[in-house]
Image (cartoon, coloured by chain):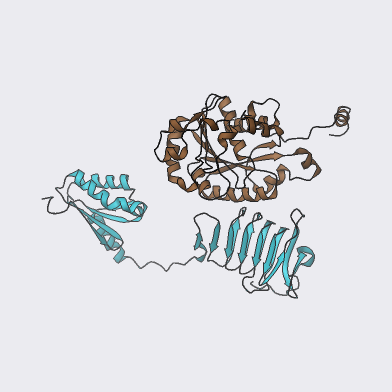
């Protein structure tokens, strides 16, 4: 009979896979059939829910055998019997619909495979750690880095760049056209700074940095000591940048 | 036996990767470990020259990967040190002759046979680099106290970090007199930028040139400051991680020594 009907049949069912195993098929044949189905899926198989119908709901011997085989060999996490599946479907129909979830935009981050480019789709990026040569960090709006920025790396932000540490790389704030942006660092000695469309070269290597910030004044990039200038002192009311 | 694969890398060329590989390999072998050094600089091999074995090369790593020979046939035994072996690179191919997967496959065999496998990485961060780090467990990043070398080392450390390989820093070719005068970056300046653990400091030493030209391992030359530093680095890699790091100092002049004897100066 196993020659006529296949020993394993797989069918998609909502967000699950319904796997039917012929009740009289030999175990080896079923296992090789299952391997053909699940092996190409690799890690994707681990997130799929499998409804396993081994055809013997009464004692469940074959069901448990294949279930443990699937769990061990392919790392499947969720395997249910048809009875359990029907019960869960029933339960989900009777319970209230789930509350609307809040979409957290800050999680939408993407790193390239060599880890050298970091691009975030959230507005403000806050990072901790050392930024090394060859890395490029892009933020839609503000970029805050707690750590040092080594020479040879590139920071690009739509808004301000604040570095709680030393800045020795290239920093481009207010890209492409926000002249109000500032670049601030506790140890300000960048290779180059850009704000909106303006570019300024940094001081030669080796000079000692101070707690300074760069901003645009009369169409020129100016670097001032932050505490002496205190640029936001005169603002009567806090605003969102 | 499961050997450790250590890749010796730098990004920039000419900072002393090959010398470091040969010296650390020799020191580990003298300490009784079975060591193989693998030249990954395919097309521009010179680890064989530094080790004085260029006239014994019959097969190379590319032949092993292409199954033209067995691993044992390409492994050349050192003339001077027992337990030290070399797998040379091919001089007639280029870096694309092998792939990272090939290296993972060969490394499995190497791990079973040797205690330490040192990979001499080529300069650059392209295919040759990828091949060399493919199977590595850890890395030693060689850097000289120059801004360009530090910049490249920084990039390499980032790439190694992305591959989840821990790297340690070897600062090579320190000239203590220049550091004291302020004309050269101190090791502390380099560590400040790269912020990884140090594995050792090696000072510039004329004996390195002699060793490279004669093929006598640096660590076998008595009184060689660099040789002693490499021996200590090998000890740190070989189960003595807490061995204190010695900072190279300029030798004091006669008057300086007299002054320090009677309590003046440092």
Q: Split into 4 quadrants, where in the image is the C terminus of chain B?
A: top right
Position in image of residue A221 (x %, y %): 73, 69
Q: Is residue A52 left or right of residue B177?
A: left
- Please tell me which residue lies in front, A157 or A57: A157
Position of B189 relative to A200 (above/below): above
Q: Is residue B112 visible?
A: no
Residue found 75% across the figure and 70% down from its top: A233
Q: Split into 4 quadrants, where in the image is the N terminus of chain B?
A: top left
Residue found 78% across the figure and 67% down from its top: A229
Residue found 45% across the figure and 38% down from its top: B107
Position in image of residue A113 (x %, y %): 49, 55
Position of B263 relative to A131 (above/below): above
- Please tell me which residue lies in front, A102 or A150: A150
Q: Is residue A195 left or right of residue A108?
A: right
Q: Tell which chain the image draws in brown.
A: B
Position in image of residue A40 (x %, y %): 31, 52
Q: Is residue A118 left or right of residue A49?
A: right
Position of A89 relative to B171 (above/below): below
Position in image of residue B204 (x %, y %): 71, 37
Question: Picture quarter containing residue B214?
Answer: top right
Question: Picture quarter containing residue B105?
Answer: top left
Q: Is residue B254 left or right of residue A116?
A: right
Give the drawing colour for chain A. cyan
């Amino acid at each position: 009979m196993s020659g006529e009907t296949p020993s394993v049949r797989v069918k998609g069912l909502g967000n699950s896979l319904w796997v039917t195993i012929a009740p009289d098929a030999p175990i080896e044949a079923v296992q090789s059939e299952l391997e053909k189905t699940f092996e190409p899926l690799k890690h994707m198989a681990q997130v799929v829910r499998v409804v396993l119908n081994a055809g013997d709901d009464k004692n469940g011997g074959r069901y448990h055998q294949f279930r443990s085989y699937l769990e061990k060999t392919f790392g499947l996490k969720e395997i249910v019997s048809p009875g359990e599946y029907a019960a869960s479907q029933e339960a989900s129909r009777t319970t209230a619909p789930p509350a609307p979830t809040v979409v957290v935009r800050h999680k939408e981050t993407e790193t390239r495979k060599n880890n050298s480019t970091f691009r975030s789709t959230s507005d403000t990026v806050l990072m901790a750690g050392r930024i090394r040569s060859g890395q490029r960090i892009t933020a839609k709006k503000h970029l805050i880095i707690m750590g040092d920025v080594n020479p040879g790396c590139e920071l690009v932000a739509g808004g301000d760049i604040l570095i709680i540490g030393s800045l020795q790389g290239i920093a481009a704030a207010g890209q492409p056209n926000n002249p109000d942006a500032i670049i601030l660092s506790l140890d300000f000695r960048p290779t180059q700074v850009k704000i909106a469309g303006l570019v300024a070269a940094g001081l030669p290597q080796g000079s000692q940095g101070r707690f300074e910030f760069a901003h645009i004044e009369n169409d020129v990039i100016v670097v001032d000591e932050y505490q002496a200038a205190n640029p936001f002192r005169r603002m009567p009311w806090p605003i969102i940048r | 036996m499961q050997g450790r694969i250590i890749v010796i890398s730098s990004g920039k060329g000419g900072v002393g990767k090959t010398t470091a590989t040969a010296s650390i390999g020799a020191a580990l072998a003298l300490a009784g470990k079975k060591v193989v050094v693998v030249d990954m600089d395919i097309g521009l091999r010179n680890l064989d020259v530094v080790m004085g074995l260029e006239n014994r090369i019959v097969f190379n790593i590319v032949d092993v990967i292409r199954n033209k020979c067995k691993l044992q046939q390409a492994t050349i035994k050192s003339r001077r040190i027992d337990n030290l072996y070399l797998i040379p690179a091919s001089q007639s191919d280029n870096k694309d002759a092998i792939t990272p997967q090939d290296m993972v496959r060969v490394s499995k065999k190497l791990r079973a046979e040797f205690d330490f496998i040192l990979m001499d990485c080529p300069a650059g961060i392209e295919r040759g680099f990828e091949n060399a780090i493919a199977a590595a467990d850890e890395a030693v990043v060689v850097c000289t106290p120059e801004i360009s070398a530090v910049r490249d080392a920084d990039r390499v450390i980032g790439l190694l970090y992305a591959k989840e390989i821990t790297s340690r820093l070897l600062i090579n070719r320190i000239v203590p007199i220049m550091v004291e005068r302020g004309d050269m970056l101190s090791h502390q300046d380099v560590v400040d930028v790269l912020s990884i653990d140090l594995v050792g400091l090696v000072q510039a030493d004329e004996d390195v040139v002699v060793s490279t030209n004669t093929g006598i391992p640096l660590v076998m030359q008595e009184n060689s400051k660099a040789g002693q530093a490499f021996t200590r680095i090998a000890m740190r890699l070989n189960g003595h991680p807490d061995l204190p790091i010695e900072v190279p100092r300029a030798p004091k002049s006669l008057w300086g020594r007299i002054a320090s004897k009677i309590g003046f100066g440092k």
